[in-house]
């Protein structure tokens, strides 16, 4: 989903014009961005959490030359979706994250 699609949904589901819906959507994104820049976590109940994490400086390696390089300390943003906390089930081929618990092997009665 793109920002334009979000604006369209806000426009259709409210009494706002398309321009007003765009302004509201942009304002929400700007508030999230500013909070993260201040180092605050942003929690959106029912959707997920944007978390600011600090990574320590470490030594890395240039994969092309093998040369050791210093990777500086930095802050990174991660997102934890709300539904991923509810269930993680292992399938034969891979890990699957779903919002509802689904039994991969239904019980036969």
Image (cartoon, rainbow, N blue to C red):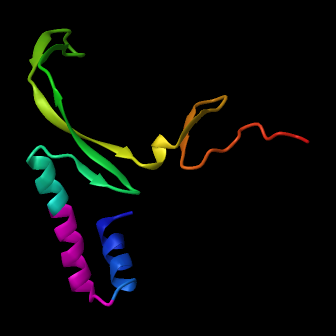
Instruction: Choose top left, top right, bottom left or bottom right for residue 70.
Output: top left
Q: How many numbered marks does the figure carry? A: 0
Residue 3 x/y as whole percent: 29, 67
Q: Main secondary structure of the magenta part?
A: helix
Depth check: give the residue in front, 85 or 22. Answer: 85
Which residue reaches farthest right? 109
From what the image shows, is residue 100 above or below residue 66?
below
From what the image shows, is residue 5 above or below residue 15?
above
Magenta-tinted stretch? 15-30
Name the residue rendered at 19%, 36% in the picture: 76
Residue 23 on the magenta segment: yes
Left or right: 99 as drawn, with respect to 11: right
Residue 54 x/y as whole percent: 16, 30
Name the residue rendered at 54%, 49% in the picture: 99
Residue 11 x/y as whole percent: 33, 83
Left or right: 103 as drawn, with respect to 39: right
């Amino acid at each position: 989903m793109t920002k334009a699609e979000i604006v369209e949904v806000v426009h259709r589901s409210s009494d706002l014009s398309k321009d007003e819906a765009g302004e509201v959507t942009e304002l929400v994104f700007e508030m999230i961005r500013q909070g993260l820049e201040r180092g605050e976590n942003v929690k959106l109940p029912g959707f997920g959490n944007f978390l600011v994490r600090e990574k320590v400086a470490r030594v890395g390696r240039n994969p092309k030359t093998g040369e050791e390089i210093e990777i500086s300390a930095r802050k990174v943003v991660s997102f934890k979706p709300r539904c991923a906390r509810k269930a993680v089930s292992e399938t034969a081929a891979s890990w699957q994250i779903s919002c509802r618990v689904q039994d991969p092997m239904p019980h036969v009665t």
